[in-house]
Image (cartoon, coloured by chain):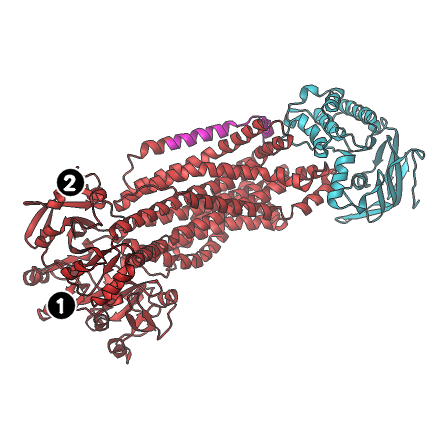
Amino acid sequence: MIRATLVTLATTLAFYRQNPLQALFVLTGLVLGCGLYTAVAQINASAKASYAQADEILGASAQWRITDRLGTNVAIADYIRLRRSGFTNIYPVIEKRLASRDGALISIIATDLLVLPLTGAGDGSTDDSAFQESPFDGSGWSRLTQPPFEAWIPAQTAERLGVTEGQQIQLREGTVLPPAVIRSQPQQRDQIFIDLGAALSIFETDRVSYLAAPPLTPSEQARFVDLFGDRLVLSNQSEALDLTQLTQSLHTNLTALGLLSFVVGTFIVFNAVNFSLHARQQTLRVLRDLGAVRQAIVAAIAIESLIWAVTGALFGTLLAQPISAALMPAVAATMQNIYGASVSSLPVFNAGLFWEALLLALAGLTLALVLPLLRATVVRTRDSSADAETVLSQRDMALAGAGLLLLLIAYLGYPLASSVVQGFALLALVLFAGIALLPVAVLLAAALGRLGLQHHWLARWAFADVSLQFPHLRLAMMALLLTLIANIGVTSLVGSFRLALTDWLETRLSADFYVTAGVMDADVIAGEAWVRAAHRRVVAETSFAGRTMTVVGVDVDAPDFGPANVIDGAPNSYADWSAGGNEIERVFANEQLRYLVGIEVGDTIALETELGARSFEVLGFFHDYGNVNFSLHLASHRFSQLYASAQPQGWGLWITDDEEEAAELGLSQLGLEPTQWVSQRDVLALSLAIFDRTFAITRALNTLTLLVAAVAIFASLLAVYQFRRPEYALWRSLGMSWSAFFVVSGFPIVLMTVVVMALALPLGVALSWLLIHKINVISFGWTMPVVVAREPIIFLFFVVAAVVFAAFILASIRQRTVVNTALKSLAGE
Amino acid sequence: MSTAVVFTEIFKAAMFELKHIDKSFRDRDDFINVAQDLSWCLGSGESVALMGESGAGKTTLMNIIAGLDTVDAGEVWVDGVQIAELSQSELTAFRRNHIGLIFQKFHLVTALSAWDNAALQARLAGVFDQRFATNLFEMLGISHLAHRRPSQLSGGQQQRVAIARALMHRPKLVLADEPTGNLDEATSAAVIELLVSAAADAGATLVVVTHSSAIASHLGHVMRLGSGALTPA
């Protein structure tokens, strides 16, 4: 048996020596599939490793966080009082997320290294490769804390920002950071670290973002509440927003895209293995005739698969390294922009992923081998060509039935799905339904075309040829369909998201100018000729159901919030809200409270105010795209009573038509610096830039899966050409011109691609509907209208057409030579 | 004999003429000498059986006449045209218009019906004639099979369709390579009779490569190829 297996293996492997291109295709499919999957898995693992360190700051424990009861910023004076009261482990932290002058997003963290209670836990951190010396050694310490100070930038961040040692980063509002030093502290991630003193000086403030503290004993906690409970809030970070939970949807999304890549890769492998087994059928038959038992053949093919799997997983894991390194910055940006999670932009190599890739490769190969193997080892008793006359085989009909059933299950399951996993199961049903419906769609289109154009012999021939090419291209077309559905779904999702964000920004940022700093007198500003309206927005922060709750004081006559913004409110809800309540406050809540906590119109929420605990009745909801926090809108006259000491956030100025220049001049004359106001146009541009960066990862993965699908088509076309070479030689022997040849041989792929596009469009829209109305709502608690924009989908179809055309051209390049050579052996066949 | 010159019908116009051709190739360790200073001229409307040992190069010689293969030296004239001077596309067009080919394995297009298969070359040449096609199908006894696919036809029926295809565009030269090699004896006899009479009716010159003396007996002349030379049998 062993000898027979080895002889069989040597004989079957000899095929690849003769056909190195086939070996290349098997390997390409495996490497691309494993590579993309491993890259995404590595990105997920790296991001999750960052969350595990989320309650640490620069190597120090930050299990407890102290914030101001009425605002996020804590006065330095409070910090000093805390230390004088014996809380010496507490340290101040400033965290800012700003834009550089050229629009790059940067995160800044500042603390006092001298008081940092370092745990040493970060010593083994993997994102601190530049951390080679203690900050307290030599003169490094004094340079950091004394003018002109230093900004410590991790190497990967410096590379992203294009900053070199000694260079000073200028922020959008004009502030200049200290000279750059390329080094980092543990858990610094993608942040720029500066000394607290430098930060207070640069940002001209006497407040810090929060105070952090290592684990506190119960008695310390009690003493804190006694001494400072009236002004400051102590919260345990392990009970606060769970980043892992919050970002679960994105990771599931990424994993799904990674698996999609693997599935598409498996299609290539399936095709290549199928072809290589088919091409070796004669050899296998001879081996059987010579006495090789079926088990020996199966064992030989299993060993061959194992060799392929190990090689594919190995090269796939290697390929994953540059891919994940290229994608990680986009993921880090997504995490920071959507979830506020700080993630290193450098992926962490994880050797365990090789075994995962190997298992997946083996699973994929097993899948790819089962059918061809059965076909190759079982003696056929029936000629499959007898099926050729029927338009649809029983198998195709059964598959179409299964596809429709899957769609029905998805439709019925839609209202029942309530978790992210169930949401993705619905997506899988849609994708598999598409695959199952494809053969019938293609063959029916071909049959109808043939019927409709039966008087034109060349068209009849071209349509008839579809049924001959489709069996070879079926898997590649399925891979293309999967990719296209996912692309349309995600493109619509991103497009809807972008439009919703723009609408939201235009509503929320309807003011023409925002004065972010400086002092302006309300009466003076109201008297300016260029001012149409001027309103202040005041915010107080508290906590509700484990998340931050923002209470916003909104002027009832401010143009940026009106009855049109209210969802599901009673007809007089806006008037009631404007009037304000007496015993119960009246508010509008963001959708997040409705979807994540189950608050409905008429429900009340109890919140702490400066006048003690108050009840807030929800009169209606408003869209609040992308906000991870809960939010309430309270009429400003009530807000000023309940949160009298809350600091105004600045002014929103609406100017009279075409008075922009006059407004800027007027603001200057009021004593404001140009850096103290920002125009709506700039804010919109910055917001959309952040948005585009956020979704770069999705676009990159979509492009990669499209590339893999293109390889699948290319490989399949080569297989078709090799299988049908004698037939093509016959066409030429009958005097067929090359133009007619490429019309007939190329038409089926055009038709198949068109059918794939036609099928992908409704299924892709269904996918985006599920992503927006199910998964988005389950994950984030807010929804938005589904917008299916024509332009990006047309562009996508053009790209797919170009990709398929390129695959056809590449595969056809050698056709002339090869067919001409085949002509000579035609008669001798 | 280094030169074999055979004029079968010296007074008729030559359908094709091979002038001092050389052709040899290496097949693994074997050196195959197909033609050595070989000359052969065949007149219009003639029919000839080309016989010889396996590996003598009969198929290669047929391919050379059809323009599917090239010679090492010498000239190949078909219907007054030196085909070696034609480009690939000109050669394809020439074959489409002037030559009909019949293969041992029929080589029908599986996606097309018997009728469409038979009409294929005539349509490619733009000379499809419905009445002629109908008559040809009747003559070959396959009218009732016109709408069937190749997979629904027997070997003999498929070869009749292939014969119809080779004659449908009224070629001047029909080349058949072992046209009955895949058929039983009775069917072979019927098919070759049909082929010879259909070619004669169409006025086409017919060359049939065969191993069978019985098949050869249906044709006007028999030539034997061996050691690079062609001799009358």
Name the side, left or right, on which A753 lies relative to B160.
Answer: left
Q: Which residue is mark 1?
A: A79
Colour chain B appears in: cyan
Task: Give A722 or B166, whichever is nearer the viewer.
Answer: B166
Q: Quadrant of residue A87?
A: bottom left
Q: Quadrant of the N terminus of chain A?
A: top right
Task: Give A756 or A391, whichever is nearer the viewer.
Answer: A756
Q: Which residue is mark 2?
A: A573
Where is residue A521 drawn, in percent x and y?
15, 62
Report how far apart the C-alphas of labels 1 and 2 lie in the structure.
Answer: 43 Å
Q: Is residue B105 magenta?
A: no
Please provide the residue range marked out in magenta.
A379-407
Asked whether residue A653 appears in the rendered view, the answer is yes
The answer for which chain carries disc 1 is A
Kindly report the secondary structure that dominates the magenta region of the rendered protein: helix
Task: Give B173 or A387, whichever is nearer the viewer.
Answer: B173
Three-letter residue code for mark 2: Ser
Across the whole image, how many numbered discs are drawn on residues? 2
Three-letter residue code for mark 1: Tyr
- Tell me the red chain: A
Q: Is residue A238 above or below residue A786?
A: below
Name the side, left or right, on which A460 lies relative to A826.
Answer: left
User: Callout 1 environment at 10 Å: few (<14), some (14 to 19), or many (20+)?
Assistant: many
Task: Give A638 or A547, whichever is nearer the viewer.
Answer: A638
